[in-house]
Amino acid sequence: MLSIKNLHASIDGKEILKGINLEIKEGEVHAIMGPNGSGKSTLAAVLAGRSEYDVTEGEIIYNGKNLLELEAEDRAREGVFLAFQYPVEIPGVSNINFLKTAIGEIRAYKGLEPIKAKDFLMMLKEKQELVEIDRALVRRSINEGFSGGEKKRNEIFQMAMLEPKLSILDETDSGLDIDALRIVANGVNKLKSEENATIIITHYQRLLDYIIPDFVHILHNGKIVKSGLKELALELEEKGYDFIKEEVEA
Amino acid sequence: METVIKTRTIKDKLIFEFENSKLFLFGSTQLRDNAMESFYKQGIPTRKHEEYKYTRVDLMLKGEFDFSTNKNCSDAQIQPLKFLKDAYVVVIENGVFVEGSSNVENLPKGLTVCSLVDAEKSNSPVFEKHYAQYADVKTDPFIALNTAMTKDGAFIHIAKNVIIEKPIHIIHISTTSVNTIIHPRNLIVIDENAQAKIIESFETISATAKTVSNALTEIVVDKNAIVDHYKIQDEKELGYLVNTTQVIQQRQSVFSTHTFTLSGSLVRNNLTVVLDDEHIESHLNGLYLTVGNQVVDNHTVVDHRKPNCNSNELYKGIIEGKSTATFNGKIFVRKDAQKTNAFQSNKNILLSLAGTINTKPQLEIYADDVKCSHGSTTGKLDEAKIFYLRARGIGLVNAKKLLMHAFASEVVNTIKIEALREYVEEKISKTFE
Ligand SMILES: Nc1ncnc2c1ncn2[C@@H]1O[C@H](COP(=O)(O)OP(=O)(O)OP(=O)(O)O)[C@@H](O)[C@H]1O
Ligand SMILES: [Mg+2]
């Protein structure tokens, strides 16, 4: 589904990603862990199509397409979804109008007819229940005045509504208390299928207790320095990031 | 031999026209002569005039002009401009009240809607008491000119304790085929404890020449009255509008005004609200969307004269192309006006490099126990927000539109008449196309 080869990316002339290689297949869950500033969010942003980043080398093939040639909106329409680490607030645009517009454009891109108002409302209700998000929140402007946890939950709600093929969750666990974490994880697990894949970016093992990864990668200074199975996350939690640094520098 | 041809200036022409058409002008001779004299002293403001330096009204008045006020359009053409289905409608075509096109029959008790000419003829004491008492000819040449040269307009009176639920819609239309200057004038009096909603819209129909409309409305809001006032300015390329709104508020009254400038080559708004007693509340909202070479200039004055009043002002603008928008908001807090709360905010989005925004708050505070604040911002559309929307599959163009709507919504949502809000929203969507 996704093949990243030797990806280098920089911002304002500063190189952040320094040769990333990653292969992800349908149905897989990959965890990416790494210290602050190692480039996790940068990788997510490059995948989602944020134009501030310059890709200086390498390629990303997504379902046979050159992802780097697609505009951000076309990537989303092709099924790429980024749950932002820091979702922005957009006063004056209601979540509902936003989702209706997004679904409308995604369907038009795919050559599907517009969704019926009734179907949209049913879907809204169903997904609201799935991620246990407050109805009142959904009715408000996008993230306006939401708490950190509410914003994260809204990201997962949007993910549920848009039914992406490749979801990238950038520290969706931070700011969530244990109950909220369980709910979010539960939502993600329910949305998982044989056809879609998930990248989970996190600092902590905790989320991975609920969403079991098939692979764990450690990102350090713009490179994946170690990959392994789910046990790697436990080892990392136990020994801390310093052990990676030592290993890399040794 | 050299011949010197001295072209007459617009000032000369206006004075000549004034002398020539005295029989058709409105108001007492003394009032008009005094106003003309004041205009003569002030002249047409140029770039050197502090209050008009960003808005070249002198350039707008270059060329030949006609002063006649013919009726040119049919009821069928006017019909679409009556966008509020359930309203009392006053049609003012080229500055003259058109009874046949208006819907002012079967008025409820306590509501008077007629032409200025009829109000004067009927010796209405309310008219006599309030006409031309508030907009001071000495303060602005356009006030002087309007007072000297107006021919007609609407007179609206809501009697004491009367609540008029249906909106009253004054439609100003210009329909000229030669360059014309007109001076429509309205007087609106809302008596003690009465309530009304008033909309003034400014439009052009099948005009083929430039119309300079020097429109003036005086609004008297008596004790405990509640008035909701709207201006929808949408005169397209041939429209040039100088729109003076002079408001006086009495004790415990609430006045809200909303100015939507959607089109027009040049629009200059002079809005003055005088809070002449205690416990008054005033709301001034504005939204301007400027494109092409448009010039939009909002000058507002909030004059706190007595203690314990609140005023709140919010003006927002989206500036595109080579257009220019100006906001100048003056707040006076006079010596007596202790415990005043006065807030002002002006926010702009500049979408092009060639666009210009001039924003100037002016607070003059002579009382010491007051809460006043002002702020102005000019920015671009937020890239992070655009990206967020695009990352959900919304195309760049629609993402920008959504954000512009969101920006405008803060002002649009202050419209309390649902049908009007929908109308304005639709107009805004078209502007963003
Ligand atoms: N606009 C920018 N200009 C320069 N450097 C930047 C810019 N944006 C990010 N960086 C730098 O890029 C590096 C990687 O940032 P990134 O946000 O990808 O890290 P991260 O792994 O997601 O960290 P965290 O765990 O804190 O979320 C950091 O050193 C950061 O300071
Ligand atoms: Mg990050």
Image (tube, coloured by chain):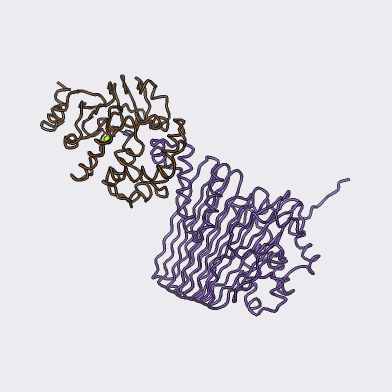
Q: Quadrant of residue B367?
A: bottom left
Point out residue A196 in the picture as x, y percentages from the top left corner.
30, 29
Point out residue B72 in the picture as x, y percentages from the top left corner.
75, 56
Determine the residue positioned at 47% across, 62% down.
B363
Colour of chain B in the image = purple
* Location of residue A121 with respect to B218 vertically, above or below: above
- Farthest residue in the right direction? B1
- Farthest residue in the left direction? A238
Determine the residue positioned at 51% across, 42% down.
B351
* Image quarter (top left, top right, bottom left or bottom right) of the N terminus of chain A: top left
Point out residue B290 in the picture as x, y percentages from the top left corner.
56, 47
* Location of residue B34 with respect to A138 vertically, above or below: below
* Location of residue A8 with respect to B89 vertically, above or below: above
In the image, the chain rendered in brown is A
Q: Nearer the viewer, residue B244 or A101?
A: A101
The reply to whether residue B12 is in sight is no
Q: Nearer the viewer, residue B404 or A150?
A: A150
Q: Quadrant of residue A80?
A: top left
Q: Nearer the viewer, residue B311 or A22?
A: A22
